[in-house]
Image (cartoon, grey):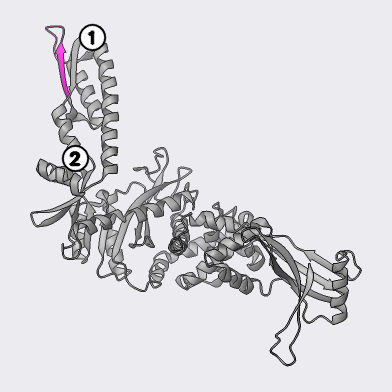
Amino acid sequence: MFIKRSWNPRLKNPKIHKQLVESYWDPDAKVSRHRTIANITDWPDHVVEALELALKNKTLIDVEGISFTTGDPYRGAGSLAIYHLWKKWNMDHALGSLSEATRQSIFLMVVQRILDPGSKLALQRSLDDTIFSRVFSRNRFDEDSLYETMDELHKVFYEVQEKLMENRSAPPTLLLYDITSSYFEGTHADDAKYGYSRDKRWDRYQIVIGLVCDENGIPLAVEVWPGDTVDKTTVVEQVNALKMRFGIEEAIFVGDKGMYSSTNIEALSENGFKYILGLDWREQREQLIARSPQQLELFDKIGVIEWEDNGTRYIGCASELRRERDAARRQNAMEEVEKELRRLQETCRKGAYYSHVRLHAKIEKLLKDHHVKRLWNIRIVPLEEGKSPEQKARFELQFSPCQEEIARQELLDGKYVLETTVSSQQMSPGEVERSYKLLKHAERGFRHIKSFLEIRPMYHHLRRRIRAHVLICFLAYYLVKQCELEFRAQGETREVEEILRRWDKLRLTHQTLRAEGYESANWNWQLGELGVSIKNEVSKLGLWRAVEKCRHSLLANVS
């Protein structure tokens, strides 16, 4: 450390500024840099000279009357980046009907979701070493206060989403809709039901969550239903909400095959929305089978074709990845079924273990469960005469693959069909397909909410707190997605949560310099090798000034 003096040479009587400065090595730029430890401009010259003498003799800490103390380090850069995003995207405005204390508690729960997901009980422990523990009242970290905050947040569940829509400069052109499920620990919770589990946790109660995103993947709306809710039954409610709550007049609703039904199509049309929907399995198969072999081969050549049937526009799409997946699934299923058929064949030869009725039913179920019912030729030949179909007997089980049906299915591999009311003048077949593929944004949103923000498993039992928990995860992902779009524009491909968690390793310390009754106190970054690397990374992504601005505004009156 040394004393640095600076002044403006263009002034007639310039004021000399004096700072205590520390040198550090920047490993990225491979140069030595300086950072200010304390501003001592207003200190008398004789005190500054005494300090300078102590520094030259390297006895700063032990010289009588001069002391330099450093407080505990606090996680800072990642936390401050989230605070910047919170302010930038008007989150306080979205929560404007709530008190400032309540908004602070919600902010802390959002920060916890992004940096260190955990329970409300763990929030104080997980954020105790962040600068917010020095800025906000300790009541904001209290578990009981957090639960009261969640109760207040639930009251404005829809209002918050509506106000976030006001951040937009223009209404969305696409409404990407998908649903998922999230399971509970425990057996008693409001709206918790057994249902189709996307998490493969059939042993747990769950809720169903619906998410609407725009064409860029920014979340627009979220809703929660009981765990036994079927996909397609949620669409009408969401469509009405988008129309009534958000005032969206014209947009294209995009949903997968789970949303396809005549009721949903009618609701979309009545509300003035156009749509792009994946056909359910039966409708899709009927449309594909109705195409000629020449048309199906055309799929593979150009990837997308269109046709009309009874005034409805259909877009046929082909995906090589899907083709390989469909072929692999069928091959695996055929191999598993053949193995089981050979076992049954041997059993039937050895003894009278099955009746004709029982054996036929068992084979039917085997083929149906593996979705290969039409792909096998099956013949059951009795080896004993005079037995009724219900009596056990010995049989010769004969089977062989149905090559004709396999060839037909191979023509359908990788192909799927979309139904749309978007005219060909508004969107070409390729544009319809690309719009449908944007559903990946909603799917990606759920992956983030589940994997990085750890919405599951849920431990809340009251309906209002379950919904508040979902909304907190929604708000956290809203900030993450806005940040992701900024980072992607600069070529950064890492996940935002991982970046912010790394940035939070850059820590702040409160340093105090005293000499002969004078004192200078500052918050400074710990710029070791890791700290410098993180600072350079934050600067490269254009957020260092914003982080510093937030630091000064939050810590201006904190000692």
User: Are the residues flagged by discs 1 and 2 in contact, CB closer than 8 Å?
Assistant: no
Q: Residues within 10 Å of mark 1 (few under 14, many from 20)?
A: some
Q: Is 42 situated above or below 114? A: below
- Would you call the spot at circle 2 few (<14 residues within 10 Å), some (14-19), or many (20 or more)? many
Q: Which residues are magenta?
A: 377-387
**Tag 2 or tag 1, which sits nearer the N-term?**
1
Residue at (73%, 60%) from the top-left corner?
72
Task: Give the camera-side residue of 414 and 313.
Answer: 414
Q: Is residue 394 above or below residue 173?
A: above
Give yes or no for residue 380 being in the magenta stretch.
Answer: yes
Tell me the residue at 27%/30% (across/down): 331
User: In the rendered image, which quarter contains the C terminus?
Assistant: bottom right
Foreground: 179 or 32? 32
Residue 161 image offset from top left, x and y in percent: 40, 66
Identify the residue at horizontal 44%, vertical 60% (top origin).
488
Answer yes or no: is residue 467 visible: yes
Q: Give, as a three-letter code, the residue at label 1.
A: Arg
The residue shown at (18%, 21%) is 400
- Residue at numbered disc 1: 349
Outermost residue, right side:
64
Q: SS of the residue at dot 2?
A: helix
Side (left or right) of 332 relative to 162: left
Q: Position of residue 190 (x, y in %)?
A: 42, 51
How far apart marks 1 and 2 lie (CA) works out to 37 Å
Residue assigned mark 2: 412
